[in-house]
Image: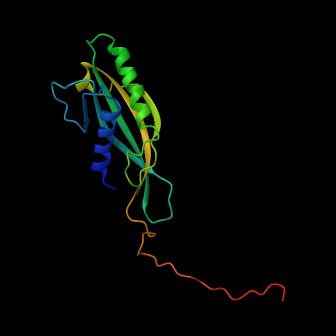
Amino acid sequence: MNFKDLHNAICTTLKREIPAIQTCEIYPAIRKELVAPAVFVELSGFEKGHDPGTEELAMKARFEARIVVDGTVEDSSVVVRSLAAEVARVVNKNTWNVKNVSPGEFISAEVDGFRPELDAYLVWLVEWVHYLHVGESVWLEGKINTHIINVGNINVGS
């Protein structure tokens, strides 16, 4: 599992699917100026996933996307909510074409007031999860050899 590739795939897809997004970054360094509307994507935590029986580590990964809109623009309250709904639509059931990533499960979208560095903007938070498998499966080709087992001969009707 390459987490950088996963993050980049998320941003690339969001920008492609939602043309209004001007900036999409992962773990951004908040600066004084940004081109909005913007989306900031973060992997916020892991929980135990369902063991696939392959010796891979199964995890439930929680992702967050913060939608940031200039609050001084006309209809900005409607714009930020519309973009949050669009981000939720795109992340739901999306695998980003990355191996070992389950379809996204949308959790919630709501106002986010917990980032003081973004107080000058309207910010909504979209959360979703993916189930991931990390490591190599014991069932990969070449690791376990398949073979045929013959279990005696059965004569029926003799």
- Percent position (x, y) of residue 118? 25, 24
Q: Residue at x 56, y 82 (%)?
A: 148
Q: Is residue 53 left or right of residue 133?
A: right
| Residue furthest left in the image | 32
- Percent position (x, y) of residue 71? 28, 15
| Residue furthest right in the image | 157
Q: Quadrant of residue 99?
A: bottom left
Say which of 154 and 52 sits in front: 154
Position of the N terminus by quadrant: bottom left
Above or below residue 135? Residue 79 is above
- Percent position (x, y) of residue 150? 63, 86
Q: Is residue 87 left or right of residue 31?
A: right
Above or below residue 136? Residue 5 is above
Q: Residue at x 29, y 49 (%)?
A: 5
Position of the C terminus by quadrant: bottom right
Q: Quadrant of residue 78?
A: top left
Q: Residue at x 59, y 84 (%)?
A: 149
